[in-house]
Amino acid sequence: MAKRALRIGLSARLMHAPPVELGFKNKVLQYLEQSVAHWIMYHGALVFMIPTLSSSAGLSRSSIRVRDVVEALDGLVLQGGADVSPQSYGEDALRPEWAGDRLRDRYEIELFWEFVIQNKPVLGICRGAQIINVALGGTLHQDIETQCPGASRHVDRALYDENRHEIDFTPDTRLARLYEDSETRRVISIHHQAINALGNDLVVEARSTADGIVEAIRMTGDVCVAGFQWHPEFHSSDPGLLDSTPVMRDFLDAADRR
């Protein structure tokens, strides 16, 4: 009998106030970004976006539990998107535009912990890496440009995925071993927030070469939890960028061992 394909859950992006031209007045949209779904599927796994469980959507929490959702899946990918709310790590927003999405934070942190409890792997991309850090008690720089003097530009709205920089791996870490035969260290950078205080049970696996900003983290212990501040899902078609295959294969191998 053929072995079934792995089933990977992908956290949803939330659009609380869709533009009126989309025709969803007073509705909340939940969606995924195509590149991250295709990156997972390219490596042979199925992707299932995980909707939020909200009583306001007419869904009783007693009818379906987060535990039930996680039991049906083999791993979780936390995708990028809106800022993490400073309230989620005990701070006030320094500017209104940095208030983030507290509702999404709560939803993703609940998912994160249930996957960890069930010993299933979690991979965080950009915002996803920041959520992992916050879920484990860490904090964020709300804005690199204003809070990290001398730092490089880690986001450029005009350049978007053409904004790139080099990273350095921390020696003797799993990430360094995954890329020990690779000479390329260039990644796509689209983030104005970054990890400040490191969360509990986390180690830093990579930093930005120019300014030391944290670019990769991993949870210690038996469960596979890794977060990458860059966007590996955007790397597949450019040989001048860090190969995205090793981190996805490592994540899926961990899911397969469950």
Image: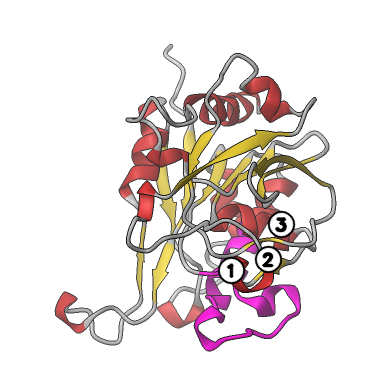
Q: Is residue 94 above or below residue 203?
A: below
> Residue 168, how many percent across, how many down?
66, 35
> Residue 149, how many percent across, how many down?
67, 67
Q: Within 10 Å of the Cα at label 2, are there few (<14), some (14-19), or many (20+) other Cα atoms?
A: some
> Residue 119, how many percent across, how many down?
72, 40
* Residue in the picture at 47% in, 49% down: 10
Q: Which residue is mark 3?
A: 133
Disc number placed over residue 148 in the picture, else none: 2
Q: CA distance from mark 1 to mark 2?
A: 6 Å
The verdict on residue 102 being magenta is yes
Tell me the mark number nearer the camera, choosing from 3 and 2: 2
Q: Quadrant of residue 138?
A: bottom right
Q: Is residue 47 above or below residue 99?
A: above
Say whether marks 1 and 2 touch (CB < 8 Å).
yes
Q: The disc labelled 1 sits on which kind of residue?
A: Glu
Q: Residue furthest front?
A: 150
Q: Is residue 83 above or below residue 237?
A: below
Q: The disc labelled 2 sits on which kind of residue?
A: Cys
Mark 3 residue element = helix
Q: Within 10 Å of the Cα at label 1, are there few (<14), some (14-19), or many (20+) other Cα atoms?
A: some
For the record, the magenta segment spans 83-111
Tell me the mark number nearer the camera, choosing from 3 and 1: 1
Say whether marks 3 and 2 touch (CB < 8 Å).
no
* Residue in the picture at 60% in, 14% down: 181
Disc number placed over residue 34 in the picture, else none: none
Quadrant where the C terminus sits is top right
